[in-house]
Image (spheres, helix red, strand yellow):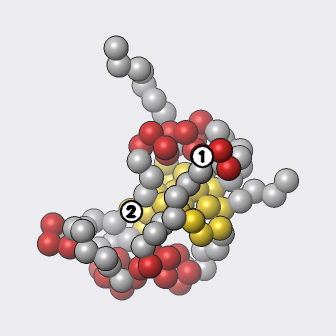
Amino acid sequence: MAETTWLVTRHPGAKEWLQQQGITGTMIDHLDIDCVKPGDTVIGTLPINLAFRVCQLGAIYQHLSLEIPRHLRGVELTSREMEQCGISLERYRVIKIQELE
């Protein structure tokens, strides 16, 4: 079975940036963790607990990272504005240290 690249974002600017980088895959607004298989790649800005599950399943997690200044938080950014905020893909392996009691 072929590995899937999941592009998880609802933001038009992020979708455009990924396309400009030549990154292709299945574009979705929300990740259904039950669809992720070992060897898949998940690209997005997932909550840490979901990124952990992706890694636990044997998939690769690439975080869509950028430094958003306070005055741009909550604003829908274009791909160009995202580039100005230093957008990049960073691969993470997320582990859980312990359960809290």
Residue 90 appears in the picture as rendered: no
Quadrant of the rendering where the C terminus is positioned: top left
Location of residue 54 (image quadrant): top right
Q: Secondary structure at mark 1?
A: helix
Q: Residue at x 45, y 29 (%)?
A: 96
Q: Residue furthest top?
A: 101
Disc 2 packing (10 Å; few <14; some 14–19; many ≥20): some
Vertical placement of 73 versus 48: above or below?
below
Tag on residue 65?
Answer: 2
How many numbered tags mark residues here? 2
Identity of the residue drawn at 66% across and 62% down: 5
Q: Which residue is mark 1?
A: 33
Residue 99: percent from left, percent from top: 41, 20
Q: Nearer the viewer, residue 27 or 3?
A: 27
Secondary element type, mark 2: strand
Disc 1/disc 2 C-alpha distance (Å): 21 Å
In front: 17, or 90? 17
Q: Amino acid at mark 1?
A: Ile
Q: Amino acid under label 2?
A: Ser
Q: From the viewer's perspective, is residue 16 above or below residue 88?
A: below
Q: Is 78 left, or right, of 16 in this rendering? A: left
Between disc 1 and disc 2, whose residue precedes? 1
Q: Along the horizontal axis of the image, is 88 left or right of 37?
A: left
Q: Is residue 12 visible?
A: yes
Q: Where residue 51 sits: x, y (%)? A: 49, 45
Residue 64 location (% of width, % of height): 44, 63
